[in-house]
Amino acid sequence: SAVISQKPSRDICQRGTSLTIQCQVDSQVTMMFWYRQQPGQSLTLIATANQGSEATYESGFVIDKFPISRPNLTFSTLTVSNMSPEDSSIYLCSVERVAAKNIQYFGAGTRLSVL
Amino acid sequence: AQKVTQAQTEISVVEKEDVTLDCVYETRDTTYYLFWYKQPPSGELVFLIRRNSFDEQNEISGRYSWNFQKSTSSFNFTITASQVVDSAVYFCALSGSFKAAGNKLTFGGGTRVLVKP
């Protein structure tokens, strides 16, 4: 499996501020994804991070709220903008490796609490 | 649309008991993949297994075994002789064929397994 580093591992933020989460992989990957896991819930795909182009967002998620960048094949960021308490969740990055298509490996996640 | 249902929200067993987690899925794709992931209290999702829709062979890996039955759209997971370290939330997930739905994972609601010593 790929080594996936996600930073920060947790944060407590004030309402109205923004937080940028980083996802770094140790090898080139084909696909990178961002998921949200609300407290006690399952995972929901936010978007697919496309290298060199705009991310592909799922229904219910918009770029203004969750801007995503992927400047190269091994790095992506997710920003949670203008946060409210409803944004308190675990945010997880996942990747698909070239050698293991259609298997997503996940980072440890970022536990976000918004006050 | 794809859907994954894990009817059991929580299962509690005593160590060394077997535990079976149910997973039922819905998809219109003829080619698809099924997965199980484990999420321990630390929060990271750990990949356990991938099964494609054309491979209905059951699989065993140590104390873990999986039973895929296409006729009933089920992909059940059994932990034999459970241990305290098996305590976690287990997610069943589904993705469509690459050309149809991309590699999006649709997750079930998860089943929390608590193994008591």
Image: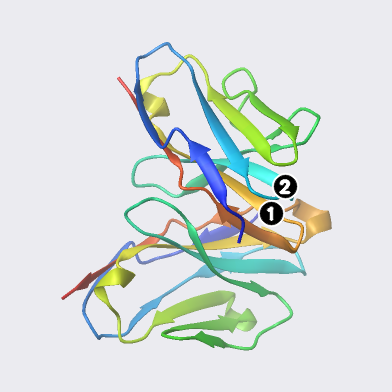
Q: Name which residue lies at 49% across and 70% down.
A: B23
Q: Is residue A17 left or right of residue B74?
A: left
| Residue that numbered label 2 is attached to | A31
Residue A71 shows in this picture:
yes
Dot 1 and dot 2 residues touching (CB under 8 Å): yes
Q: Chain of mark 2?
A: A
Circle 2 SS class: strand
Q: Amino acid at mark 2?
A: Met
Q: In this rendered view, identify the residue nearer to me: A83 or A32.
A: A32
Q: Residue at x 77, y 57 (%)?
A: A98
Amino acid under label 1? Glu
Please say which color scheme the image uses.
rainbow
In the image, residue B116 sits, relative to residue A105, either above or below, namely: below
Q: Which residue is mark 1?
A: A96
Query: Where the N terminus of chain A falls, by quadrant?
Result: bottom right
B34 over A37 or under it: above or below: below
In the image, residue B48 above or below residue B64: above
Can residue A58 be seen in the rendering of this structure?
Answer: no
